[in-house]
Every structure is written in structure tokens, then in C-alpha cells.
Amino acid sequence: MHHAIRTGMALLCLCSWGLSQIPAADFSERPNIILCMADDLGWGDTGYNGHPYLKTPNLDQMSKEGITFTRFYSAAAMCSPTRGSCYTGRHPYRYGITYAMTGRLERNEIPISDLLKKHGYTTGHFGKWHLGTLTKLKDDQNRWGDFAKDPLRYYCPPWERGVDVSFVTESKVPTWDPLIDPGSPKQTQSTRVAREKAYGNDYFTGPGQIETQNMRGDDSRVIMDRAIPFIRKAAGAHQPFLAVIWFHTPHSPVVGGEKYRALYKDRPEKEQHYYACITAMDEQVGRLRKELEQLDIAANTMLWFCSDNGPARQGSPRHVGSNGGLSGYKLSINEGGIRVPGLLVWPGQIKKPATVTAPCVTTDYFPTILEAVNIPLPADRVYDGLSMWSAIRGERMERAKPIGFLNKNGSEAAWMEQRYKLIETPKGNQLYDIINDPAEKQNLAQSQGERVEQMQSELKRWKESVLSDLKQTISRSAYIGPGDR
């Protein structure tokens, strides 16, 4: 790999602090919240993380101005489970989304959109949804489960989960001309255009409402064209907002526009497409930041950015994503499958750049946001996330509790402490010192048996709790109530 792995030499390294004093739960003005997420963007797929070719000037600028999390993790090594963790603050197995397009955000869950809406926020979701189906009538290209047998089972649109404004797809679309099937990567541009075959996934704005206008070109631009009017309206009404902006880039089908491919004309064709769609997405991040400045709301807006998992394995069509020298890719609970870019800018509170090397995870969004807006964490359920403010303020030197991970079928699990990471597999245990060995090259399980035993005991208790919640979720969801019809 060409890309350096950022590591910390201490348990928590917080550099160049310059943060204003942020009261633990007494923010003077309710901040706006924007959650941006890329799709299959690898740890090494940004300029600020050392990629030798990729141009991501706007993400790089966020890193220069705000908080860079060098150990930021997706709650799962795949898309749907991680996305639900952002909305709930809970591990995916607790709420029943254990794999891509499996399960839905059940009604008994408390999504962040619902909580914020009850406290005066307006809410919007733009781009990929991936937490359930959007229609009871039409079978999209990548339908959840067996739609023909039970079209109601996975119905779960954002407008029924506390979201006021939606512009969403159920799952993936091409990164250029999102409604058109790009065909095989071997086809020429002229052949693709001549076919003009629908890709099969639609953008929904409400029940039975499909958007067909302004759908050409870069998909990230298409998404931002809907997010910005929502933000403008909220700003004009002086209403705090939550805007969830989940790009499809660089998930397959990977298609780069000619303007952006030209930036990489000296690279092989598949790299041109992959890098082009990421640079196009980065351009939209810059457009968003400029809009916040023009609306005079940037200072009071938390803008977060991450990815839903590591890069797809190289060798897939046009997938040349980088894990930055880590071990593993998407679907793996090794570092390369779950460690992702993580950024936060909040100009009114974060005055100078800082680096946090403490492990943080997408389940942390929920409690972090609630602390920022002074809303108590609901006490009737188990949360796996922690508020990140103590780390951001430099008050806590290490994570208060480990992070647990499960793979797609539960056959492998990981328990991440501040320094050590235990991985349980059917073939045996692995123990790594992630601070000194982020690439997971040296298995310490044999030499540190006592530590393995202790961590394994903690992991067992956590798994029992998670799987108990999963069992209850499955039991409750077996009945489809009137609200789902």
C-alpha cells in the first residue's frame, strides 16, 4: 500500500487544542447538525490520509480546520447496519439489521430524527437510506428480502421515522447518471448512452412520489441539490435542523464524469472512474461548506463526515479503494473493514485543528448529538455508543468502554479496547496491540493469555446482551401492526 497509517504514540493524542470551552451540556444555542457519509470509502481514500493520487481538497480542509479522528470506526463492516447505528446509538444486532438490506429500523427504536423533531428541529434525509423499503407496491432493483411474498415486512421509509424532508433511494445507484444503467465497465460511453436503460432504483420524496427531474450527471451533486434548499429554508426560518446526507460514492456501479476523470488522465481507466467520483463528492462537501458560510450559519453547525465501512475488495469492477495499509476490506472486522475516515468541523466551537486517536464509532453520534443539544439519553434501552465530547474537549484520556463488533453472520466478533483488540474466529483467537500494530500483523494471543481470557469474558457478556436484544427485536417484528399497512 502507498498510504501511511496514522497512529498515536500515546493512549490519546489531542494536538493543537485551541477549542473554546464547550460546557458539558449547556450549549448556548442549539446547533445545526449535518451527518455526511460516503459509501465504501476506504481509510486510505482521502488526500489527508496520504493517498498519492486522490484529490480531496475539501475533506483535507476539514481536517486542517477541525477534528480528525484517526481511529474512527463504522459499527459494522457493511452498509445498512452501520447506518442504523447512526440513527439509534445502538449496535446493529440490537435493532435487527445484521447485514445489507436485512431487517429495518423497527418502530420500537428511537431514531435521532424523532428525538430532535420533538425538540424543535426540522429533519431531512438525502441520498442513500438503506434502512428499509420505500414502497409497498414496486420491487426495486435490490429489494429487501422476498418482496413478492411479503411487501409489507420491510417497509420503513424515512418519512415514517421522524424525517420531514426526504430525497432517498433504498440502496445503490450509479455514481454518475444515477437513474441510468451504466452497463458493463467494458461498454463504451456511446453504447451506454444509446441504451438508456433504467437502472432500477428510484429516488423517493414521499409515499409513491418519485423524482425524475434534474437527475443527470454526478450523483453527489444531485443529492446536494436537494439538501441545500432544505438547509436554506431552515436557516431562513431560524429553525435548527438535522440534515443527513448519505452519498452513494464510491459504491458500485462506479462511474466518473469526464470533467473529473480528466484530473486523473494519467491513471488507468478504472482508477480514473473511482478517483473521479470521489473528487466529485468532495466538491459537493466544499459546496455545502460554502453555503453554510453564505447563510451565516457555519459557526453554529456541526458538520460530520465518515464512511459506512472500508473499501470494497480490490478486483471488483473499478474498485481500487485503499485500506491505507490496514488489514482487510469491506465485510471484514479487521481494521481495513471497519476503520474509516472521520471528521468534524464546528467553527463556532472548534477554533483550531485537533487530532483524536481514541477509538470512536458511528454509534457515538447519537449520544454526542444529544449532549450537544441538551437532550437526556432515553433510559429504557441499552446504548453501545458514548458521547465523544470528553475526547473532543481533551478531558478523558481513554475510551470509557470497549467497542464490540460482529460480522455478517455472527461467526466472528471483535472487542476493541483503548490499546488492544481481540478477534474471535472459529479458527481461534487473535489479539493485537492496535496502537503499535494497526495493520494487525503480530498476533499476541499466545503470549498474553491472561489478557485474552479477560477480554473474552467481557466480549461474551456483551454478545449475550446484544443477541438477547436481537431475539426480542425479531419476536416483536414478526407482527406487522396497523401503522405498517
Image: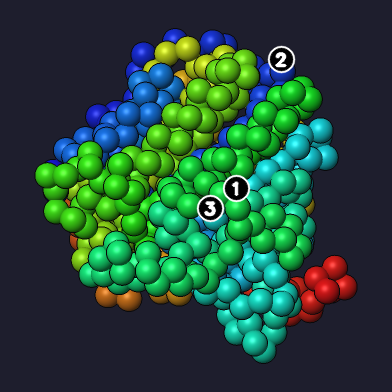
C-alpha distance separating marks 3 and 2: 40 Å
Along the horizontal axis of the image, is 160 left or right of 141? right
Res 5 → quadrant: top left
In the picture, the disc for residue 185 is none
C-alpha distance separating marks 1 and 3: 14 Å
- The residue depicted at 67 percent of the width and 61 percent of the height is 210
Mark before the other along the chain sequence, 1 or 3? 1
Q: Position of residue 81 (x, y in %)?
A: 53, 61
- The residue depicted at 32 percent of the width and 34 percent of the height is 56
In the picture, the disc for residue 126 is 1
Q: Position of residue 160 (x, y in %)?
A: 77, 58
- The residue depicted at 47 percent of the width and 58 percent of the height is 178
Q: What element carries label 3?
A: loop
Residue tagged 2: 28
Along the horizontal axis of the image, is 154 left or right of 416? right
Q: Are marks 2 and 1 in contact (CB under 8 Å)?
A: no
- The residue depicted at 69 percent of the width and 55 percent of the height is 205
In the image, what residue type sits under mark 1?
Answer: Phe
In the image, what residue type sits under mark 3?
Answer: Met
Estimate how packed mark 3 is, as few (under 14), some (14 to 19) or many (20 or more) residues with alpha carbons within 10 Å: some
Q: Nearer the viewer, mark 3 or mark 2?
A: 3
Outermost bottom residue: 149
Q: Vertically, is 78 above or below 262?
A: below
Estimate how packed mark 1 is, as few (under 14), some (14 to 19) or many (20 or more) residues with alpha carbons within 10 Å: many
In the image, what residue type sits under mark 2?
Answer: Ser
Mark before the other along the chain sequence, 2 or 1? 2
Q: What element carries label 1?
A: strand
Q: Vertically, is 436 above or below 472?
A: above
Q: Quadrant of the C terminus?
A: bottom right
